[in-house]
Every structure is written in C-alpha cells, then in structure tokens.
Image (cartoon, grey):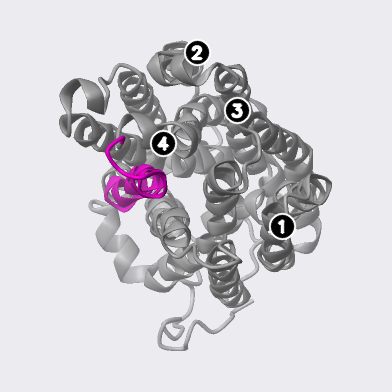
Amino acid sequence: MNTQYKKTPGKAAFAGWIGSAMEYYDFFIYGTAAALVFGKIFFPTSDPATGILLALATFGVGYVARPIGALFLGHLGDKYGRKRVLVLTLLLMGVSTFLVGCLPTYDSIGVAAPIMLVILRLCQGFSASGEQAGANSMTLEHAPEGRRAYFTSFTLSGTQAGLILATLVFLPIASLPEEQLLSWGWRIPFWLSLIVLVVGYLIRRNIEETPVFQDERENKRTAKIPLVALLRDYKADVFRVAMAAMVSTVSTLFGVFALSYAVTIVGIERTTMLWLTIITNLVALFAIPLWARLADRVGRRPVYLFGVLASGALMTPFLWSLGQNNLPLTFMLGILMSGVCFSAANGIWPAFFGEMFSTKVRLSGMAIGTQVGFALSGFAPIIAAAFMKGSSPWLPAACLALVACTIAAVATWTARETYNVKMDDLGRDSGADKQAPQANPLNACLKVTD
C-alpha cells in the first residue's frame, strides 16, 4: 500500500457513527409511524387489521428497492469512491423523509396519498442500500489491523443511536390525543429530518477517502465494472452474506411487528412499547462494541453464530410474554434478545461481511449481499401479520424468526475466519487475486476454508 495515504480510524469511525445515526433516524421513524399511525391516515377505508397490514406493507416496500439500490450504489462506491456514496445516500434519505411529512392524507386526495407514500418509501430503501455498506467499507479500510471489528462496530452503534433518537422523538408525539396525533402530530418527526440532513452532510463532506481505495485508484486497479468482477469471483460470498444477513428478521419483527401487535391486538400502551425500544437500544449501544472487541480476539464466526442462535431462540418466549401482557417478563426478554444477544451478530457483521471481499468489490459485495438478506427480512412483519390467527397470533412471527436464524447460522458456519488476515490479503482466497487455484466454494457446497 502507498504510505502517502494516512489512515484516520477515529475520524472514520466517528463519521460512520454520526452519519448512520442521522440517516437511520430517518429510516426508523417510518417504521414507527407505519406501526402506529399510517394504517389510520393512509388506509382509513379498511378495517383496523387490514389497515395495519397495508401500512406494514409500505414498510416492507422499502426493502424492495434495497437490492436495486445496492447494484447502483455498489458500482458507484467501488468505481469512484466510498465518500460519494455516503454523501449521496444522506441527501436522498433526508429529502425523501422530509417529503413524507408533507404528504396529504387519504381523506384529502384519496388513493394518490398511499401511492406517493410508497414512492417515497422506495427512495428511502434505495438510499439505505448503500448507507451501511459505504460507511462500513470506509471504516473497515481505515481501521488498524487487529481492531477492525471494533472500529466498524461504530457504524452499527450509530444505527442504534438513530433508532433511539427516532423513538425518543416519537414518544411525546405518541402521547398526543388521537385527533392531534393523526392530524399534524405524526408529521413533526419527519420534518425534523431537515436538521438531521444538515448535520450529517457537514460531517460527511470532510471525511477522506480510504488509503486502500486511493492506492487502488492511483495504480489503476479498480474494476471497470465492479458487478462483473464480483459475480465472477465472489458469487459464493455474496450468497453467503445474503443468507447470514437474514438474522435481521429478529430486528424487523421486534421493531415493527411486535410494536404493532402489542398496541393493536394486546392493548398495551404505545408509550410503554416505545420505552421498551429505547431501553433495548441503549443496552445495544454498550453491547455492540464489547462483542466487537471479543470478535477481534476470538474470531468473527463464533460471536456471530452466538448472536444468530440466541436471538432466534429468544423470539418465541418474548412474543409469548407479549401475548400474555406480562410486561416485566416482556421487558426482560426483549432486552436480553435484542439488546444483548442480537447485538453479537449486529455489531460484527460490518467486519465479518466486509472481510470476505477484496477492496475492488468490497462495497458492492457488502451492499448486494446484505440488501438481499435485509429485503427478505423486511417482509417478515407483513407475513407474520397476515398469518395472525387463533389463540396464539404471535406464533407465525416466532416461526419466521427460527427459520431465518437457522438459515443464517448455516451460512455463517460455512464462512472463512478472517479476523487474523491482513487487509491487503482479504478476499484473496475467493477472488481473482487468489494465490493458488481452489475449487469454487459454490461447487463445494459452501465448504469452510479457514
């Protein structure tokens, strides 16, 4: 690597943290509003259950745009640099979120209102597809050897901070009388995204491109068409990342389905469930860097596997306690499942997934792989809501979590361990830079090559 390019791990980690917090504030207020408000103001002609279903469908629609956005933003980031992606995603997310708050309701313009809502949600999903992959690539490539998981974990800590901020903003809004909430109150969190946009932009415009990417560009080693290089040399890794990323089903079921189910079906107060979200994510803020430090010492796979299996297993008792309206048990299990165990997977995937690829396709590989997995997980709340029946309406959601986490665990088990591999050597055993011929991992049934 050319030594004229200096690593700035602290600055990159802070930019990743604050940028992700700002951008995912925008993304998460939509999920909260979809669970609590949108069914009544954009689909009022439906019965309550159908209104919830349609509102959650608009939440899931954002995930449809993610794989498409990943193709475009992955190419942009690997061809022209990580910084361009980070600025573009922030602008697109901020503007589309602000415009959601400006939308007329169904009572004002009829079916055009939910159509415009879906379009703006697609813009949010397109933006989110490149946000984490860009921030993670930037932080990973600036991080010192032996501490890559720790430094990249700040991006996900920022995501949790964004969720906390979004929930805190919605907390007083949710306490408004129903008439005020549905008429103007719900718009305020979306309008506040303008502040988020300005703060995030001022920070991100000053970050430096990563040393390894600058070295690749100076020596003309960047891929002409990153997607072609990715699919030629890293098909198995993209597939593996997509399947391992399905652990995010735990997050979407906890953050969206459980909130809607608790408030609408069980009858728990909105503010009570929002406090559960806040406390859980405060715990995650501290848990994520601790898990990441452990992954730098013992490896990525064992920590990620624990997070996948433990959080998937805890979803069943958590939802059961929710259905019983047992709030002390619900809080305990929710914090343990989402705040502690899920953080083991959530905190280290930036390093775990990013280290599967070489610099020339890293952003594309992470973006496409994760967004396919996240897209599959994004529809978990609507699928679970569609099958709510009988005396245990939460059971389909629990089954979805178990299936998704089992798939993620198998994919994780087949991955290579990379915590002790140097940055310049990452991706060599899979891609075109490999030092010796090896069997295609797909043809070897995703065989582990530690």
The span from disc 4 to disc 3 (Cα, nearest Å) is 29 Å
Q: Is mark 4 on a helix, strand or loop?
A: helix
Kindly identify the amino acid type of the residue bearing the numbered disc 4.
Arg
Q: Name the residue under label 4.
A: 82
Which one is in front, 121 or 393? 393
Q: How far apart, in angstroms, are the residues tagged by discs 2 and 4? A: 19 Å
Which residue corresponds to mark 2? Answer: 199
The residue located at (31%, 35%) in the rendering is 44
Q: Is mark 3 on a helix, strand or loop?
A: helix
Residue type at the position of mark 3:
Thr
Query: Would you say 355 lies left or right of 289 here?
Result: left
Sequence-earlier tag: 4 or 3 = 4
Secondary structure beneath dot 1 equals helix
Label 4 or label 3, whichever lies nearer to me, is 3
Q: Which mark is residue 53?
A: none
What is the distance, in whole Å, between disc 3 and disc 2 at their CAs? 19 Å
Quadrant for residue 158, please give it.
top right
Say which of 306 and 202 sits in front: 306
**Pointer 3 local density, CA inside 10 Å: few below 14, some 14–19, many at least 20:** many
The residue that appears at 34% across and 29% down in the rendered structure is 41
Query: Residue 315 appears at what percent x and percent y?
Result: 67, 61
Q: Give the range drawn in magenta.
A: 44-69
Where residue 294 sits in the image (x, y, percent)?
A: 80, 54
Nearer the observer: mark 3 or 2; the answer is: 3
